[in-house]
Image (cartoon, rainbow, N blue to C red):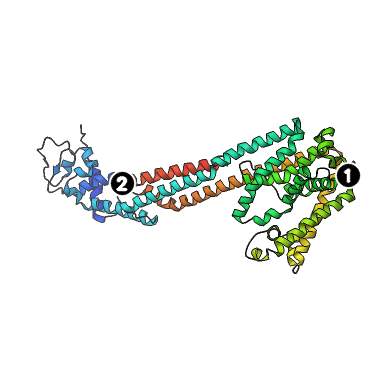
Amino acid sequence: MFYGVKVPESAVDDAEEENSDHHERKDSESLYSVSAQSTDTSVSTTPELNANSNASTPTWRGRLSSASLESIPLLDLLNPSNVTLELRRNHTYTWMKNYGKKLNDQRRKKLHFDLSKDELKSLKNMLNERFDKAYIRIHKTTKASQTEKVFFAVTTYIIFLCGLVIGKHPEWFHVLYTVLFAILMPIRIIIYYKIGYAFFLADLCYYVNVLLLIYIWILPSSKMLFVICSSFSFGTLSFAVITWRNKLVLHSIEKSTSTFIHVLPGVVMYVITHQLPYEFKVERFPGSLKLQHWEFMYGILYTSIAYFVWQLSYHYFITIRRADQIKNGQVNSFEYLRKAFAKKPIGKFVNSLPEPFPVVAFTLIQYGYQLTTMSLCPIFFQHKYAASAFVSFIFLTASYNGATYYVDFYGKRLQNEVIKLQKELNKLQSKLAAAESSDDLTKGSDIASSAGTLREVTAATTTGSAF
């Protein structure tokens, strides 16, 4: 049902005045002004109604007078498709239409956005593609492989097993240590050769582990070897966890192996010294019973002999015999430390020395470090609880370093992915804003929906877990 509307005469007069000067027009009266301006009061034509009874909306033809406007249905006036061609040609109607188009063009030009249908489709595809890539990157960042999951469970169980054996069957702990060494070291050798770290296999920590195996299975009655293994295990290897921040990262076989190499020798010496029954020690490790009290000077002498045997062998077979490979980029511990400490006072001092004195300085510094760290060995040898507390502290330090690695490394890695995703989103933000504000909202709705989902993923990832 249509309702007729009567046009006030004042509105017609105002419209005629506005038509004469073509200036400011009120929005509330513009539609009526359009009809009134096309009206000539001296000439009045009676509108003819279309005889087509099937038309849902009457069509008005001919010129419109002010009287005829009184009977035009309101919905016809609001629907431009039902307005007469004469009305559409009216100056005010044309001016308003052109002015609206001009505003729209200015808005497009201001936002630097003028996309065709194909360009808008291309923009949508680009956004969806980046959205999929972002999902893939985040998925790779947070996903652990099946091997890492298995090794995480195995490492956790090995820690439990070590505690169980130490408490219940300490006489089997050296066997467990040997089995773990036999499993992990071949893997370490293969990995290090593959990534070009083969020279690191000649470092002091591996040398000490080999000496410990020699003591356990070949020379268990050697007092000197027992002192050497105790000095290195409680000294350099244990303190390396603090100095070099060894990490117990349960899912990483590489980092777990490094923790095993530095932590377990001290645990083995603790078990042999304090946990084994006396009768078993007499039969299996008589060398530990030959040392009733820690002889500090003999400890320094034995440790110094072992240290310089390793250091001279290292420099001959690595520094001298493999000098060409080192110059070509092969990494060893000495070159690594020179670069790692290049900005620190000790590094600047060593690097400032002429050749071959940097190597000599490095050797003496490492030797002094060993003598300093082994100074607590008399306490650990005499007092069981002090040794137990020290070994526990080293293990807790490795665990803390591993926890820090999980939070910092994976948290920062995920944060970098989120930042990268946010940058890609910001590059499209202006185009998306323009698409949402343009006339073709239907075309931009899909893009806006995708962008909204992308924003939700970014926000959820930023505020979510770091793992």
Q: Amino acid at mark 2?
A: Asp
Q: Position of residue 132 (x, y in %)?
A: 44, 46
Question: Seen from this angle, which residue lies furthest top?
Answer: 168
Tell me the element at label 2.
helix
- The residue where tag 2 is placed is 27
Residue 217 is situated, as x and y percent measured from the top left of the image, at: 76, 43
Residue occupying the point 11% across, 40% down: 50
Image quarter in which the C terminus is found: top right
Tell me which residue sits at (41%, 44%) in the image.
450
CB under 8 Å between discs 1 and 2: no
Residue 63 appears in the figure: yes
Residue 38 in the image: state x and y as whole percent. Answer: 18, 49
Left or right: residue 436 compared with residue 394: left
Q: Is residue 104 left or right of residue 78?
A: right
Mark-to-mark CA distance, 1 and 2: 102 Å
Task: Please indicate whether residue 434 sits to the left or right of residue 58 in the image.
Answer: right
Crowding at mark 1 (Cα within 10 Å: few <14, some 14-19, many 20+) = some
Q: Determine if residue 400 is in view.
A: no
Between 440 and 467, the residue placed more toward the observer is 467
Q: In the image, which disc is placed on residue 368?
A: none
Disc 2 crowd, CA 10 A, few/some/many (<14, 14-19, 20+): few
Q: Residue at x 76, y 40 (%)?
A: 268
- Disc number placed over residue 294 in the picture, else none: 1
The three-letter code of the residue at mark 1 reads: Trp
- Local SS, label 1: loop
Upstream in sequence: badge 1 or badge 2:
2
